[in-house]
Image (cartoon, grey):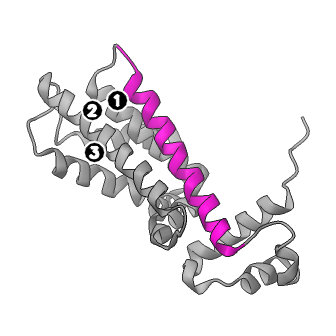
């Protein structure tokens, strides 16, 4: 099977996301991206409009992945709230393992979005509201302890949002093992 060749734009975005993770969006210039690719900065503009476009492409793509994944989880019938929470954890692990640099950019640099900031914040609010809904349903059905939903949400999301820091340092942990154990650890305090 032939491997898909990366387009120049994809190469630029991949290089930029690694630099954003390492230095932060504000510290990276178009010249830095070009230098890391071994080309002139002016050549970048044949493929992208701006550094802001790169940031937007990275963050919006990941934000939409999470939103789409959450929508599928919410729509599932015949699943308990605990199963849905396990699926949310799995969603975070999978996206993070596939995109650690993009996750770093999303978590550390989302506030630098310009035209797309409102859209990103709406994606985030919708995601968190769906998460709250699952938690509330679990409490209402007696599947979860009646703990303050905001505390549960903060506790679980804080861990999930920082996985990009931890996963690259723990490559020996098998993905399936992480999926099961992380769900067990994160949900122990709220399951009955």
Considering depth in this image, is 52 or 22 the residue closer to the camera?
52
* Mark drawn on residue 186: 3
Residue 40 makes an appearance in the image: yes
Considering depth in this image, is 57 or 102 the residue closer to the camera?
57
The first of marks 2 and 1 along the sequence is 1
The first of marks 3 and 1 along the sequence is 1
Kindly identify the residue that appears in the image at 45 percent across and 59 percent down. Answer: 118
Where's residue 130, x and y in %? Answer: 32, 38
Please identify the quarter of the rendering in which residue 44 is found: bottom right
CA–CA distance in space, label 2 to label 3: 15 Å
Tell me the residue that label 1 is attached to.
Answer: 84
Kindly identify the residue that appears in the image at 17 percent across and 52 percent down. Answer: 151
SS label for mark 3 = helix
The answer to whether 37 appears left or right of 16 in the picture is right
Please identify the quarter of the rendering in which residue 22 is found: bottom right
For label 3, count other residues whose C-alpha is less than 10 Å away and answer few (under 14), some (14-19) or many (20+).
some
Q: Nearer the viewer, mark 2 or mark 3?
A: 2
Where's residue 168, x and y in %? Answer: 54, 61
Instruction: Evaluate if marks 2 and 3 touch, with contact meaning CB atoms under 8 Å apart.
Output: no
How would you classify the magenta stretch by its main secondary structure?
helix
Residue 174 makes an appearance in the image: no
Magenta-drawn segment: 50-77
Residue 66 is a magenta residue: yes
Tell me the residue that label 2 is attached to.
Answer: 134
Position of 118 relative to 93 (above/below): below
Kindly identify the residue that appears in the image at 27 percent across and 29 percent down. Answer: 82
Instruction: Evaluate if marks 2 and 1 touch, with contact meaning CB atoms under 8 Å apart.
Output: yes
């Amino acid at each position: 099977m032939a491997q898909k060749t990366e387009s120049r734009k994809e190469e630029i975005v991949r290089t930029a996301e690694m630099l954003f993770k390492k230095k932060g969006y504000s510290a990276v210039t178009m010249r830095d991206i070009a230098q890391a690719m071994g080309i002139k900065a002016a050549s970048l503009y044949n493929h992208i409009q701006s550094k802001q476009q790169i940031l937007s492409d990275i963050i919006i793509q990941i934000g939409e992945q999470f939103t789409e994944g959450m929508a599928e989880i919410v729509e599932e019938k015949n699943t308990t709230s605990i199963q849905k929470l396990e699926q949310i954890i799995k969603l975070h692990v999978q996206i993070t393992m596939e995109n650690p640099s993009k996750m770093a950019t999303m978590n550390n640099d989302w506030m630098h979005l310009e035209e797309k900031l409102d859209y990103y914040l709406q994606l985030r609010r919708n995601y968190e509201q769906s998460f709250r809904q699952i938690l509330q349903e679990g409490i209402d059905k007696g599947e979860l302890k009646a703990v303050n939903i905001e505390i549960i949400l903060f506790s679980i999301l804080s861990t999930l949002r920082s996985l990009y820091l931890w996963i690259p340092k723990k490559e020996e942990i098998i993905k399936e093992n992480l999926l099961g154990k992380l769900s067990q650890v994160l949900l122990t305090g709220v399951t009955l």
